[in-house]
Amino acid sequence: MSMKETPRFSEKRLEEIRALVARYPGPQSALLPVLHMAQEDFGYLSLDVQKHVAEVLGLTLIQVREVVTFYTMFREQPCGKYLMEVCTNASCMLNGADELVRHMCDKLGIKVGETTPDGMFTVTEVECAGACSGAPVVQINNVYHENVDEAYIDAFIEKASKEDAA
Amino acid sequence: MIPSDPKQVTQICFDRIRIPDQRRLEVARANGAYSFLPTVLNEFSSEQIIEEVKKSGLRGRGGAGFPTGLKWSFVPRNTGKPTYLLCNADEGEPGTFKDRDIMRYDPHLLIEGMIMAGYALGVRDAYIYIRGEFKQEAEILNEAIGEAYAANLLGENILGSGYSMDLTVHRGAGAYVCGEETALIESLEGKPGRPRFKPPFPAVEGFYRCPTVVNNVETLSTIPAILEHGGDWHAAIGAPNSAGCKIFSVSGHVNKPGNYEVPMGTSLKTLIEDYCGGLKHGTVPKAVIPGGSSAPWLTPDHYEIPLTFDDLVKAGSMLGSGAIIVMDETVDVVKVARRLSHFYAHESCGQCTPCREGTGWLERLMIRLEAGKARASDIEVLRDAAEHMAGRTICALADGAAAPILSMLKHFPEEVRARVVEKAA
Ligand SMILES: Cc1cc2nc3c(=O)[nH]c(=O)nc-3n(C[C@H](O)[C@H](O)[C@H](O)COP(=O)(O)O)c2cc1C
Ligand code: SF4
Ligand code: FES
């Protein structure tokens, strides 16, 4: 999708959204799931995407914006191809999460919250992922990786970089 | 990892969790899932079910421990409005990871519990509000729900009983406070998850201002066993005023962290030593958070405490969600408290001044303390701020924020003092 094009859901998506709306007493209830879909389809929730979501659900832009800014999973900016979210809450911290974050940032040459210049990797810190027996836990593009250590991350980054170069 | 079963004690929610492929309807059914459902739908009345659940002594597994049968009996009948059932699968309390295992390994147990609860409460539409990060678990649930619809276990006229119920999985999007039941309702209405004033309680005025029951995943997953075996059977398991089993999510400095379902009343020491393979360092923990990060900390004095609602309250803490975070002698308690203060400051929804301002203060002071830059007067401000937050807000998040700080000050004054800078001469 080029930058200029206005983002629009596919016909198939719109059908899915209509079915979803029918499952709730009111259309606004479908807002969170539809924003998840939008983020999946368009990468992040630009103002244009938010306007489109508002239009599709018959809501005001304010109603959509309030929700987008309240919830941490919704992103208004693009992130790297691999979004690496490290849990640094108590149990993960007790099992080396801070050291892991430092290692990842050093290896990639970025700070927490930043993306590598090639647009490949973003590293963020998040709150308890609800998987503390696997501490430290890293979510990469919404998939849980548990008992993560430096070697595991190094291997992941190398593999991802190689695949991208190929 | 599928929860292990080192002792083979009575289990309820995890009874069938180790069966391979239990998440598939065919396998679940072969092992007894839904076998008692027709009896419930055809032979039990709503009042009978609620009576049985009251008799069982079941108390909510989501954190507050409210008696489930009593909660259900508060739902007004014949209001002309629909009644909604919402399953709380937000699982955001730091240290908690139990509902995830039920949902990904035995989703049909939860679905069956929801059908039974829905029937008892006269519910047509039920929802599972699952934290947004649990995308894979939501997919597993959706698959299981699809199978259940295809087998007429959901939808119109379930198994020819005349009862109809629809079930929808709804993903949140990253906000701890949405686990609070009224914030969950706001969120499910497509709004920011800001808790509502209570009363009115959700049972009377909840989702779209209609009567609504919110129950935790583990609570609802206990219903099928209670109805099949009877309330008295359940009441006889566990301890007085803490009937049944409880899943404890144990993490931190133990050798085998994981979920263990044990009868209530099992001691903390037994859980850590016999189930979790003991501590990583030393023999007795330096501190234990027994009920999720919002629960006040325990010290070695309470290592042998029986894990029940009442014993934990007597010890100045709470059973909460059953999340046990263990810290051994290597822990830096100031660092842990600082990290938790960040969590609460980040997650405060901001609508109550004591919570919004207080959580920010606590975090700033804790950063200063951890860095060795706090003065003795800062410690008094810290204590004062924490003491004045609790109990003065719309929801209990503020109490949770105060707990780690007050615990640190109470139990580890020397470590705090060691971090304080002497006033420049
Ligand atoms: C800040 C906050 C977060 C909460 N998070 C959860 C949660 O993630 N899951 C949950 O079941 N209950 C959570 N609760 C408790 C719910 O408000 C509610 O008591 C519970 O869902 C009721 O279900 P139960 O009676 O079956 O336990 C939370 C409460 C507060 C104050
Ligand atoms: S106590 Fe905190 S989180 Fe709860 S409603 Fe008030 S500001 Fe929001
Ligand atoms: S503390 Fe990291 S997953 Fe819970």
Image: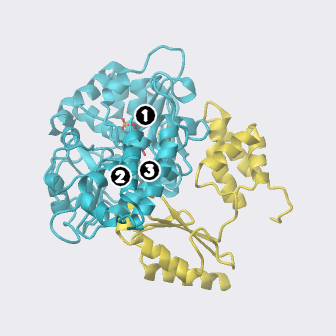
Chain colours: A yellow, B cyan
Residue farthest along the right direction in this orientation: A4
Which residue is under mark 2? B405
Residue type, label 2: Ile
Q: CA distance from mark 1 to mark 3?
A: 22 Å
The total number of labels drawn is: 3
Work out which quarter of the rendered image holds the C terminus of chain A and state it: bottom right
Determine the residue positioned at 48% across, 36% down.
B154
Marks 1/3 same chain: yes
Mark sitting on residue B392: 1
Q: Which of B377/B283 is in front?
A: B377
Q: Position of residue A76 (x, y in %)?
A: 69, 57
Mark found first going from the N terminus, 2 or 3: 3
Residue type, label 1: Arg
Residue farthest along the front direction in this orientation: B425
Tell me if I can see residue A91 in this picture. Answer: no
Which residue is under mark 3? B92
Q: Which of A23/B64 is in front?
A: B64
Q: From the viewer's perspective, tell me whether residue A114 is left or right of residue A96.
A: right
Q: Circle 2 marks a residue in which chain?
A: B
Can you tell which quarter of the image residue A142 is in? bottom right
Query: Does label 3 point to a residue whose CB lies under 8 Å from ligand 1?
Result: yes
